[in-house]
Image (spheres, rainbow, N blue to C red):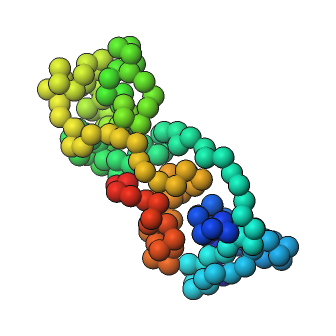
């Protein structure tokens, strides 16, 4: 069994990525069984359906960086220190929502100041939007898990075009 284990609900909906030790406890207690165990792509499935309320997918700093590929949305820089920019500045009523937060280099952030991108003569390589991904798993964790070829079949239906 790999270091990380994908945990599926009884209906195959991905619930979490956990570590081997915790997965073994689930197996030992008879709460789950192994679905796939190929090197680093271990998957266990719960024997009973667990009902969980859908959490709200909140934009964290790391989530915004992950969505934007650790790349400034204005100039494309990846090597400069990165920060979070409010497209509509906070002082002008901009909110902390997925569609108003972008990954931005400190240079562009300073150049933009408290202006809108248009006013500062800056364009965005893509419009920020709320990513579609499975809300049970945090966005950065989900995007990382999606890169595991053995887990792709289980996760991809929930990924949409998140990148
Ligand atoms: Zn920049």
| Horizontal arrangement in the rendering, residue 46 relative to residue 135 (left or right) | right
| Horizontal arrangement in the rendering, residue 27 relative to residue 82 (left or right) | right
Picture coordinates of residue 7, whole percent (x, y)? 65, 68
Q: Nearer the viewer, residue 9 or 139?
A: 9
| Horizontal arrangement in the rendering, residue 119 relative to residue 150 (left or right) | left
What is the residue that sits farthest to the top in this orientation?
91
Picture coordinates of residue 100, whole percent (x, y)? 36, 31
In the image, residue 53 sits, relative to residue 38, either above or below, namely: above
Identity of the residue drawn at 41% across and 37% down:
98
All told, the count of numbered labels is 0
Identity of the residue drawn at 43% across and 51% down:
132
Decide if residue 140 is in sight here: no
Image quadrant holding the N terminus, namely bottom right
Image quadrant holding the C terminus, namely bottom left
Picture coordinates of residue 156, whole percent (x, y)? 44, 66
What is the residue that sits farthest to the bottom in this orientation?
38
Picture coordinates of residue 153, whole percent (x, y)? 47, 74
What is the residue that sits farthest to the right in this orientation?
29
In the image, residue 51 sits, relative to residue 48, either above or below, namely: above
Q: Nearer the viewer, residue 125 or 55?
A: 55
Decide if residue 115 is in sight here: yes
Could you say which quadrant of the image residue 129 lies in?
top left
């Amino acid at each position: 069994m790999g270091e990380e284990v994908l945990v599926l609900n009884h209906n195959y909906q991905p619930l979490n990525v956990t570590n081997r030790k915790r997965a073994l406890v689930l197996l030992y207690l008879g709460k789950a069984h192994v679905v796939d165990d190929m090197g680093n792509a271990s998957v266990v499935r719960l024997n009973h359906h667990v009902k969980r309320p859908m959490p709200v997918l909140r934009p964290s700093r790391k989530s915004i960086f992950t969505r934007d590929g650790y790349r400034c949305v204005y100039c494309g820089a990846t090597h400069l220190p990165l920060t979070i920019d409010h497209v509509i500045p906070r002082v002008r009523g901009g909110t902390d929502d997925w569609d108003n937060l972008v990954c931005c280099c400190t240079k562009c952030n300073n150049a933009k100041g408290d202006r809108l991108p248009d006013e500062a003569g800056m364009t965005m390589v893509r419009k920020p939007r709320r990513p579609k991904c499975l809300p049970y798993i945090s966005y950065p964790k989900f995007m990382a898990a999606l890169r595991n070829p053995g887990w792709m079949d289980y996760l991809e239906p929930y990924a949409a075009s998140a990148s």
